[in-house]
Amino acid sequence: MLATGPFEKAKRYIENKTTGKEPQVKYNIGPCITISREAGAGSDLIAGKIVDYLMPKQKDPSIEWGVFDKNLIEKVLEDHNLPSVLKKFVEDEPKTLSNMLNELFGIHPPILKLIHKATETIFNLSSIGNVIIIGRGSNIITKALPNSFHVRLVAPVDFRIKNVREFYGNTKKEAEDFIRTEDLKRTKFVYDNFHIKADDPLQYHIIINAELFGIEGVAKLIGDSVMLKFPGFYK
């Protein structure tokens, strides 16, 4: 049976990238798309649609993508010993992750220790490419990587409440509480760990109001922007 769940797809992505097999035609490291989002803006659905949109347009359409959100990163870390598996892909980098972060953001060891595993995982996944990473300050962690492309998804509260209610099947009050709590939690995480505001527009290549375009439209807009920035990967 083919692996179709998000976790199984993530594991398959990692396994395919760590088998040591080389494709017949070798391209440079593919894009890494990071998505920062307001709660309920539809990031998970949009990420899947981006992959569907980009894969047929790749020079090699057989190269798979990985999609990792906050919970999936933590789960794969626990199940797959992810940092050690992926370390081989960045061993020849001239700068270590810690040095890069310290130089860029002045992050000191106590802060790095707090988020080290997830940060290392995000950096290594991004270094492999053809990956979408949602949240966890991934746009900041990967800022120095030339293959990175950063997106911020926003939407009016009513639109986000509707999405949350449809997805979780909860009440309007529960959806409102969820959005308020998640937005505060995400903003605090980014600021506490990176001293950057999550809604700072200068941290992103594009900021999109998801309500104005719909899931398919947002995915196409992001996909077209990625192809514009990295034309060498696409037909």
Image (spheres, rainbow, N blue to C red):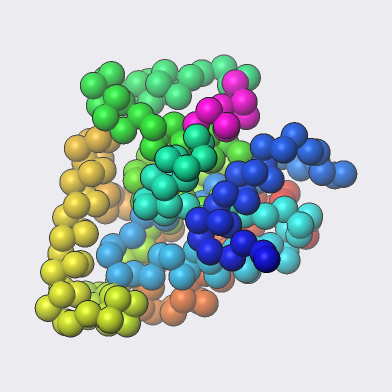
Quarter of the figure with the C terminus:
bottom right
Left or right: where 1 falls relative to 136? right
Residue furthest to the front in view is 1
Residue 99 vs 173, above or below: the answer is: above
| Rendered position, 26 above or below 47 | above
Residue appearing at x 31%, y 26% in the figure: 112
Tell me which residue sits at (82%, 43%) in the image. 23
Q: Which of 38 and 48 is in front in this view?
A: 48
| Magenta stretch: dominant secondary structure | helix
In this view of the protein, which residue sits in the foreground, 85 or 45?
A: 85
Magenta stretch encompasses residue 16: no
Residue 42 visible in the displayed image: yes
Residue range (magenta): 83-91
Q: Residue at x 62, y 26 (%)?
A: 88
Q: Quadrant of residue 56?
A: bottom right
Give the x, y percent position of residue 26: 80, 41
The image shows residue 28, relative to residue 41, as above or below, that is above
The x and y percentages for residue 125 are 54, 40
Side (left or right) of 123 relative to 131: left
